[in-house]
Image (cartoon, rainbow, N blue to C red):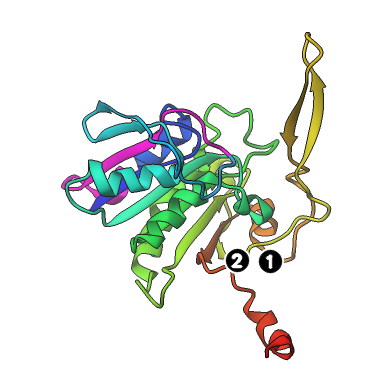
Amino acid sequence: MRILLTNDDGINAPGLKALEKIAWDLAGASGEVWVVAPAFEQSGVAHCISYTHPMMISKMGNHRFAAEGSPADCVMAALGHVMPERPDLVLSGVNRGNNSAENALYSGTLGGAMEAALQGLPAVALSQYLGPENFHIDNPFEASEMHGAAVLEKLVRADPGQQGSYRLFYNVNFPPVPAAGVKGTKVAVQGAREGMRFGVEPHSSPSGRQFLWVKGGDQRAKATEGSDAAVNLDGYISVTPMRADLTAHDALVGLREIES
């Protein structure tokens, strides 16, 4: 199996090292693992692409490249320039922190997987929820490293392939517990945490100029029952199938009355 890896935390991120271990377990001795990842952290860029300016790309080692762009840029760079053949699978992550619930909408990790799906490739975004039980252990990515390959093997077998205009991709979040504390895997919808909103916090520089830091809310706030964030906080790995189709299909019928 030929696997392409990217992320949004940057090419030197510890989560990418965890993903490489997962990918090699999946690819096997005769497989290939390629890395095209951002040269610098790109958290929160979602599906952003560098449409108005070029990006520099540098070879960092065998099958390893750093691009000065977003995760979606990195996928396009891999497919259009770096790799001689298309990959069989694209993996994005492992993100430091969860991309459950509303976080999914901001996530560069998901942006990389979404771009791969738009290019017609099977893709999975992987993220490691952090909390009191795993934040300070020697390896905060222990749960994803230990359980990642098994989850991906099942997903690869279950994936139906291209169906319709927008291909499925998958959002996988590992719970905020050590590997031994993982209870299992659940397929879950994207949830919403109660009262969770992103916002800004102002700060002044020594020169008096004002700057705004973007900040999130409580990642352990109660979430929609049975949703990704809820099962993660209960100790389960969540698997959420997604498409890049943003249509609110449930609202179509009610809007027919405005047609003319």
What residue do we see at 67% from left, 56% from top? Answer: 101
Does residue 169 appear to the left or right of 131 in the view shown?
left
Whether pointer 2 and pointer 1 mark residues with C-beta atoms closer than 8 Å, the reply is: yes
Give the residue number, with chain letter if any, for mark 1: 226
- CA neighbours of label 1 inside 10 A, class few (<14), some (14 to 19), many (20+): some
Q: Nearer the viewer, residue 151 or 227?
A: 227
Does residue 29 appear to the left or right of 158 in the view shown?
left
Which x, y percent locates residue 72?
43, 47
Q: Nearer the viewer, residue 252 or 112?
A: 252
Give the residue number, with chain letter if any, for mark 2: 188
Helix, strand or loop at disc 2? loop
Mark found first going from the N terminus, 2 or 1 = 2
What residue do we see at 74% from left, 90% from top? Answer: 257
Q: Quadrant of residue 89?
A: bottom left
**Above or below — where is 138 with respect to 121?**
above
Inspect the image, locate mark 1, and give the three-letter code of the amino acid beneath it: Gly
Which x, y percent locates residue 221?
79, 50
Verify whether residue 26 appears in magenta.
Answer: yes
Residues under labels 2 and 1: Cα distance?
Answer: 6 Å
Verify whether residue 53 appears in magenta.
Answer: no
Q: Residue furthest top?
A: 206
Which x, y percent locates residue 51?
44, 45
**Above or below — where is 174 with respect to 240?**
above
Inspect the image, locate mark 2, and give the three-letter code of the amino acid beneath it: Ala
What residue do we see at 39% from left, 49% from top? Answer: 91
Helix, strand or loop at disc 1? loop
Which x, y percent locates residue 12?
42, 26
**Above or below — where is 123 with respect to 15?**
below
Which contiguous range is marked in magenta? Answer: 24-43
Q: Which mark is residue 107?
A: none
Q: Quadrant of residue 237?
A: bottom right
